[in-house]
Image (cartoon, helix red, strand yellow):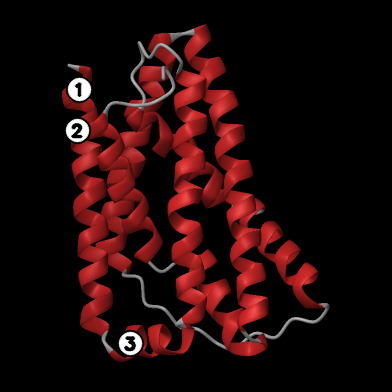
């Protein structure tokens, strides 16, 4: 299938997806807060909502980035280099600021549907998510790809396919997970170093590939 990336690239991408998921962020905090405050049903609805928002982001990025590549392979390469700088900044920021996770119970009325759409809205209105996927996805697509739009869309769908079941497991074990994270600052710091190391490696890989 022409939209599939090569095996090593896809393996690296899946690893990146896993690291992104375990790194505490707005989506994870929202899932945990809703689960603790309103129960597993609200937590699961939030997981589905944030995953839907992420899928929307990645598909939009796929369309825009494939159009950019069709217009200019050089411009696409420049975007990849800019993305490498952004990934390097994320790596340094993880070490400088850390990812301390403080979760407070958050109740939401209106049942499953409202929790779902709240998850969608929080994800879609987060500018960091937009910026991340615009700079992240191109790192795994070659400028001479046969079907770049298909590859970008496939990578976006794969991200959701990997993180959705993990989000469900997160909700099911919310109380234990929040307790473990907050009681073990060294665990959080280890996640910071894992995140920084992986994205620092991606950032260094792009200029080397360009040469």
Percent x, y of residue 66: 52, 19
Q: Name the residue located 46 percent from the left edge and 8 percent from the top edge.
A: 72
Q: Which is nearer the eye, 2 or 73?
A: 2
Q: Which residue is mark 2?
A: 205
Dividing the picture into quadrants, the one containing residue 82 is top left
Tell me if 62 is positioned left or right of 209 in this view: right
User: CA separation, marks 3 and 1?
Assistant: 39 Å
Image quarter hosting the C terminus: top left
Let me know if residue 155 appears in the view.
yes
Percent x, y of residue 46: 64, 68
Q: Which mark is residue 180?
A: 3
Dividing the picture into quadrants, the one containing residue 118 is bottom right
Percent x, y of residue 115: 72, 71
Q: Which mark is residue 209?
A: 1
Tell me the crowding category of disc 3: few under 14, some 14 to 19, or many 20 or more residues within 10 angstroms, Cα based. few
Dividing the picture into quadrants, the one containing residue 87 is top left
Q: Name the residue located 38 percent from the left edge and 90 percent from the top edge.
A: 179
Disc with the residue nearer the chain's start (2 vs 3): 3
Of circles 3 and 1, the one toward us is 3
- Up/down of 66 relative to 27, above or below: above
Percent x, y of residue 90: 33, 52
Secondary structure of the residue carrying numbered label 3: helix
């Amino acid at each position: 299938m022409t939209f599939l990336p090569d095996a090593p690239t896809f393996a690296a991408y899946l690893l990146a997806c896993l690291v992104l998921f375990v790194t505490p962020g707005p989506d994870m905090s929202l899932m945990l807060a809703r689960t603790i405050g309103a129960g597993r049903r609200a937590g699961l609805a939030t997981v589905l909502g944030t995953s839907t928002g992420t899928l929307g982001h990645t598909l939009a990025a796929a369309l825009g980035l494939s159009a950019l590549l069709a217009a200019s392979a050089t411009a696409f390469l420049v975007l990849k280099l800019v993305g490498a700088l952004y990934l390097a900044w994320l790596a340094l920021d993880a070490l400088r600021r850390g990812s301390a996770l403080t979760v407070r119970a958050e109740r939401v009325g209106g049942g499953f549907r409202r929790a779902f759409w709240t998850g969608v809205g929080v994800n879609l209105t987060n500018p960091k998510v937009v910026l991340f996927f615009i700079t992240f996805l191109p790192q795994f697509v070659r400028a001479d790809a046969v079907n770049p739009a298909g590859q970008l869309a496939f990578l976006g769908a794969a991200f959701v396919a990997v993180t959705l079941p993990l989000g469900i497991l997160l909700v099911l074990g919310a109380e234990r997970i929040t307790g473990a994270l907050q009681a073990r600052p060294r665990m959080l710091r280890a996640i910071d170093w894992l995140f920084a190391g992986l994205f620092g490696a991606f950032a260094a890989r792009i200029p080397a590939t360009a040469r």
